[in-house]
Image: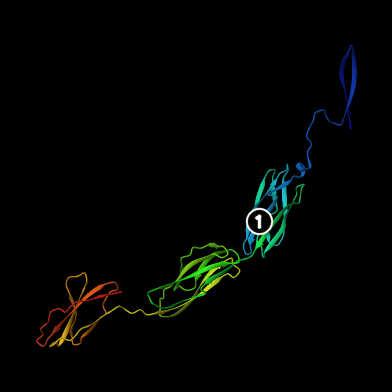
Amino acid sequence: MPTMMARVAVQIRLGLPIIALALVTLTGCQSLSGGKSQTAEDAAGAISTSPASLTFGSVQVGNTASLTETVTNSGGSPVTITQANVTGTAFSINGLTLPTSLSPNQSITFTANFAPSGSGSASGSLSLVSSAGNSPITVALSGTGTTQGQLSVSPTSLSFGSVNVGSNSSLQATVSASGGSVNVSSSSSNSSEFSISGISLPVTLSAGESLPFTVTFAPNASGTATAAVTFVSNASNSPTAESLTGSGQAGQSPSVSLTWNASSGAVSYNVYRKLATDQNYTQIDSGDTTTAYTDNNVTSGATYDYVVTAVNEQNQESGYSNMAQAQIP
């Protein structure tokens, strides 16, 4: 290796001028100027994680909690992540495609999940293997599984009895959580004749909390109907069902039955009707030899006025009887 020689003259004045010579030896091609050498981190790269650990807190059995994790190339050279090893059966990751390369100062974010299968504390780790000089780097994972709640419906069955076809009947029920909170995600009925209302889903019920709801039976045919309403939740006994029964019966058309006392000398009778809001009567029956009449041609919600006249052998008709009024339900 060549050696370069240099002479440096230093003048010191101590009364008389003295000249001192100092010899400096430089080895190789080095110079006297300073410089920064390349570190191992610059050469191999380095990765860092944020946060350094993930704590999921309390998560109910049957639920999943998710947190984000960010990995950054904090070195001066590109880094390739080749493996992501997770320990702990309740933990998993997603959103990280391997292998993946990071340029200096580049980051990637992915998701870590905690899905406990039982109650109690759980711990694990995420180990990232890469070409970085500080590989592998480990992220601690921890969480606690809590007891899974139960969902109940009260009463367990509803009986609607007989309901006219074209009409409906409603009954109340409640849904309750016990042993832990329960998230109720949906409800359904397996029959179009039974429907649920009065409850907005999804909803989370704390342990001991109840919510009312309404079930309506609207038969579309005669005969017995059976069904069930079902609630889907994260409870251990999901789905939770309530049985339903009811009977549809053919509805009877409304009618008005009239009777009157016999009139002396009468051989027949005429019946007249009008709406309560009208002025004039219209004859709806004539020549009736009995003292009773049934009007089957009426409309629900209407109010009718009725009068009767008597007819003798000479076909002479009496004046109107007293008025009878009927309100049709």
Q: Residue furthest left?
A: 314
Query: How many numbered marks does the figure carry?
Result: 1
- Residue 47 visible? The answer is yes
Against 251, residue 143 (above or below) is: above
SS for callout 1: strand
Against 31, residue 149 (above or below) is: below
Can you give x and y, in whole percent of width and height, for residue 86 in the image? 72, 58
In front here: 304 or 155? Answer: 155
Residue 28, by quadrant, is top right
Can you give x and y, in whole percent of width and height, for residue 99 in the image? 70, 53
Q: Residue at x 48, y 67 (%)?
A: 212
Amino acid under disc 1? Phe
Can you give x and y, in whole percent of width and height, for residue 325 in the image? 23, 75
Q: Residue at x 65, y 57 (%)?
A: 57
Residue bearing mark 1: 56
Can you give x and y, in whole percent of width and height, for residue 294 in the image? 25, 82
Other residues around mark 1 within 10 Å, as few (<14) / some (14–19) / many (≥20)? many
Against 261, residue 44 (above or below) is: above
Against 11, residue 254 (above or below) is: below
In front here: 291 or 63? Answer: 291
Q: Is residue 321 left or right of residue 14?
A: left
Q: Residue at x 47, y 74 (%)?
A: 191
Q: Is residue 325 left or right of residue 210?
A: left
